[in-house]
Amino acid sequence: MMKYLLFALTLVAALAPGQFAGASPDLTATTAPAGSIWLDTLDLSKIEQDWGKPGKCQSVENHPLTLGKTVYAHGIGTHARSIMRIDLHGSATHFDAVVGVDDEVGKRGSVTFEVLADKKNVFETQVVRGGDAPVPVSVDLTGVQSLSLIVDDGRDGIDSDHADWAGALLTLAADAGNRPQMVPSPQNAPGPADPPRMAFEPVSPLPAIHGASVVGSTPGKPFLFLIPATGDAPLTYSVTKLPAGLVLDPKTGILSGRLKSSGVTVVKVTVKNARGSATRNLRIIGGTGKLAQTPPMGWNSWNVWAGKITQDKVEAAADAMVNSGLAAHGYQYVNIDDTWEGQRDAQGRVTSNAKFPDMTGLANYVHQKGLKIGIYSSPGPQTCARYEGSYQHEELDAQTYADWGFDYLKYDWCSYGDVVKGQSGPDVFKKPYAVMGKALAKASRDIVFSFCQYGMGEVWTWGESLGGNCWRTTGDINDSWPSLRKIYQSQNGHEAYAGPGHWNDPDMLVVGQVGWGRPHPSHLSPNEQLLHMSLWCLLSSPLLIGCDMSNLDDFTKALLTNDEALDINQDPLGKPAGRIAMDGDVEVWARPLADGTWAVGLVNPLLEATDGTLQLSALKLKGAQPIRDLWLHKDLGEISGSYTVSVPAHGIVLLKVGKPR
Ligand code: GLA
């Protein structure tokens, strides 16, 4: 605040007398004063923000822009963290606005606002919270080339950070030749629509087994696992030595039952068809806390349907997961996100709303296909979409989900921020997850526990200790390069904290038809999508498809079903990649695999193709080593010393290097 006051004083002192005098424009007006323009008349698609889409003359949730009960006809409703860059080239003399957290979130949300003129800080607020008085902004822009408007998250994560630049007005210079223009920063410009660097491989008619090669379950609780396998139908399945309590359906490949005891059993699985057979070991681990031995693979409703999800759409998703062939490659969770929740009954038991008439029937429908089903809630009284949360009903909710037949819970911080308002420290972040973790352990089914709190309090350092099977490490992803780049680059260093049973989650996939209720083809370029998929495999991220699986084009299908990439994600060693080296701008991400080889991604964040080099010494490999390109499906022979390859703009080359043990 001090800094802001000092700056304001300096600014006033530096101004020619009369420059501000009495001329403050009416920022609630519908028409801009002569010689000025509303900021919302610029191209808002260039704004980068961590959640939602910028609202033109609206809040980020499409309500009238409202600060301190005053409604503004003009302005931009954004969400932390966000950045707007405006090329002025001297065309403006003044910027005015009123900033604050939109009234739509009540007392939630906490943000800071900052204005940079030619990279110099010319205005900043202290942390502004929901319900605080709005703050006026008035800065001189004479001669300024570039203006940046930045919202940060108040250092407590982005929950409810609905930040308004209300009445945002640019006063133009009398001789303004250029019109101000909203621009992305060069490193955030979308990638070119170059053809994807991949070879389309026809699906082999021969039998092959995919997906997880190790699964865990608590003895006495229901066990379900569909053996993922491709090859011409009909396929028949057989196994050796199943642990007591499990049975196999030889026609469908569904393993089910309840394990009788703890311990590890290695089962030999064989899949046959008229063309031949394939065999692979499946390690079944009985014990408590043994879920998610490999990153969960499946689908979640949010990125495609958001609030428009219904029971029918979830059933259609389960159908599509099987019919499109995705289940045969290892995808198995069908997860409902927010907006299924109804009221609580007289006993406090949560019910589903009219969109979900029969939760038990739905879970059965999904289970009959050998697939599993996921649900969503919040530790707060309300979810992020303002539906019923689990606050003070945790045990009952966990058992209700188990009674319905759910296998996965995404638990989203949302309004819990209100419960702990004014409190800080790691225990505040941990407590609600510890409470639900205990409740889930008591429930009568195994339920994978997915934390969603956007990385607050460095969740990766303690998520495992509270029973987390995965934890979001970032704010929400969207299908834009800035979002993808920021998220993948922020994952470096987190690899040390993940392993079998507990995974970093940089959020769901945004390939295919996505759109949060208004599906459209992903705005990521083909090579950006390859980079996204490959890195999520290298990072051992949960692979939750975010698109409409009933509407898959050939590219998206090939992207989601490359078994060579999926095998990296599901590698039983469970050691995610970190960025082990930089070759100029090219990033080298690598991870060791269970067979003694390495998976390597050469990542090019530049807007042009460039050569990237892998030094074998970075992997501590010596002598000649075999190398294979996993998207070209091609053995490249042996290399010694280093390997150089052209990496597409915003693209990746995914390699497997070294001799298998
Ligand atoms: C948050 C989460 C999203 C989604 C929505 C639902 O934004 O991060 O993934 O679950 O809530 O309201």
Image: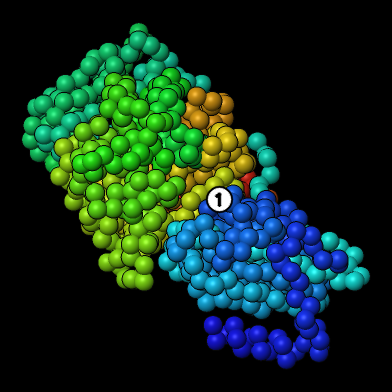
Q: Measured from the top left, where is residue 507 in percent x and y?
A: 44, 47
Q: Quadrant of residue 274?
A: top left
Q: Measured from the top left, where is residue 639 in percent x and y?
A: 49, 45
Between 24 and 329, the one nearer to me in the picture: 24
Answer left or right for 182 relative to 296. right
Can residue 489 be seen? Answer: no
Answer left or right for 405 relative to 599. left
Q: Quadrant of residue 335?
A: top left
Near mark 1 (Cα within 10 A), the count class, few <14, some 14-19 or many ≥20, is some
Residue drawn 27% across the image and 13% down it: 251
Between 467 and 423, the one nearer to me in the picture: 423
- Total marks in image: 1
- Say which amino acid is labelled 1: Glu
Q: Measured from the top left, where is residue 475 in percent x and y?
A: 47, 55
Between 147 and 612, the one nearer to me in the picture: 147
Residue drawn 33% across the image and 54% down it: 380
Q: Measured from the top left, where is residue 214 in percent x and y?
A: 25, 36
Residue drawn 38% across the image and 61% down it: 417
Can residue 401 be seen? Answer: yes
Q: Which residue is mark 1?
A: 61
- The answer to whether 336 is drawn above or below residue 364 in the figure is below
